[in-house]
Amino acid sequence: MPKKARPKATKKEFILKKASTLFREKGFAASSMRDLADDVGLEAASLYNHIQSKSEILQEIIFKSANECSIQLEAINKSKISSVDKVESIIRFHTQMMIYNFDHYFVMTHEWMHLSEPYLTTFITQRKNYVQQFEEIVNKGIQKKEIKPILPYVFVLNILSAVSGLEFWHRSKQKTTPKQLEDNMVLHLITGLKLSSKK
Amino acid sequence: MPKKARPKATKKEFILKKASTLFREKGFAASSMRDLADDVGLEAASLYNHIQSKSEILQEIIFKSANECSIQLEAINKSKISSVDKVESIIRFHTQMMIYNFDHYFVMTHEWMHLSEPYLTTFITQRKNYVQQFEEIVNKGIQKKEIKPILPYVFVLNILSAVSGLEFWHRSKQKTTPKQLEDNMVLHLITGLKLSSKK
DNA sequence: CCTACCGATCGGTAGG
DNA sequence: CCTACCGATCGGTAGG
């Protein structure tokens, strides 16, 4: 018989999952540990056998998504495809994150400001690096005449926030498949709206 | 001598302005009335001579922006211009809202879920109508072959959330003029990213 | 994992 | 517009 079984990992993940849904719906500050305990099916005090603090929960939710984003961008950036195709890959990747890790992704994009130090600074730095790396891809595309001369950060921020706005879709009846959604995101954000470009 | 002077209107507006900045920075739930009182330069209790409750402040901030959006959309919709030009007008209008009424607009898009009833229901209904009206413009453009066959709500939500993502720009050094920003928003969201459309 | 409880802080009121 | 204060709720701990 081992000294300690460890069902904690599983239970902790369950708590994190419930917390990510709760934080998305009510926001971090308006969510109490008693709310969370109700969702999990425990008394509030019992949560502290699995997690250290309310802050820790937010940190784990946010950095799980943030690190995945960073890793994916790195991988896309290294691949030998055109700049436009890299941008397309990033749009598809973010759209998928939003669809399949909705709560985590949403909490990352909307609640990061409630991180405590030093995590807040870490996150801001990580995000800044992410945006710069993305901008660099756009810049190279402009130099190679693949991409029109647009302000790179406008394009980058438009994409990142357009994706996080898909919450509406997610809440709604989902009459569209994830694939359709992804294709339409690419269609709009890369080729624009106009049918003929006579102007 | 009149029975009552009325400096209240001015003071209340000052409180609302301070509150909109505070709510944008910390979120509604994490902002206390003591925080707000500090910013305004009063004791917390004294705020209640000018406003009725914390909820009321949020309501006034949000519906001021929401009503302005609804009125503007109505006006644009009635004007005799092409569908694409209507969409462009809406993009420019929202970008301007974000630039010049940053705090109010941001609080509307990020904190509306903290409205209490019946205001919450009113807001959700108003927003739904707004999106539907916008979608209708896109739909007509598709029928008239001005706009490519895209899912209208994808396009509409992309635009609305892209604008609210410009917070980053707003916080930054603003090396771009508002006019440049507006033009780039239109450039991206209407004509896309690609230089040549050979594909 | 629960009961019992802590000090701190919350939105808001009484009274002047 | 302030002092003084209210009941409620917060994140978290002690002890078993």
Image (tube, coloured by chain):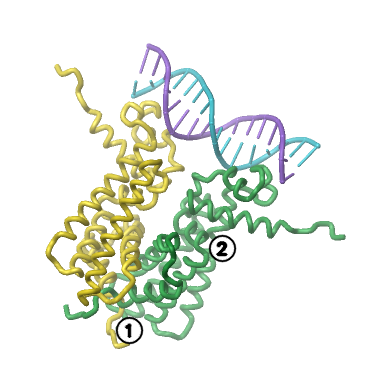
Chain colours: A green, B yellow, C purple, D cyan
How many discs mark residues in the rendered view? 2
Circle 1: residue type: Lys
Residue A132, horizontal then vertical, whole percent: 41, 69
Q: The N terminus of chain B appears in which quarter of the rendering?
A: top left
| Residue visible at 47% across and 59% down in the picture | A106
Q: Residue furthest left?
A: B80
Looking at the figure, which quarter contains the C terminus of chain B?
Answer: bottom left
Residue at position x 41%, y 48% in the image: B113
Question: Camera-side residue: B183 or B38?
Answer: B183
Looking at the image, residue B32 sits to the left or right of residue D14; the answer is left
Q: Quadrant of residue C6?
A: top right
Please determine whether, in this image, residue B138 is positioned above or below residue C2.
Answer: below
Looking at this view, name the residue that lies furthest to the right: A1
Secondary structure state at the residue bearing disc 1: loop
Q: Which residue is mark 1?
A: A144
- Mark positioned earlier in the residue sequence (2 or 1): 2
**Tag 2 residue:** A64
Q: Secondary structure at mark 2?
A: helix
Q: Position of residue B74 (x, y in %)?
A: 20, 55
Give left or right: position of A190 versus B141: right
Estimate how packed mark 1 is, as few (under 14), some (14 to 19) or many (20 or more) residues with alpha carbons within 10 Å.
few
Residue at 37% over, 80% down: A84
Classify mark 2: residues with Cα within 10 Å, few (<14), some (14-19) or many (20+). few
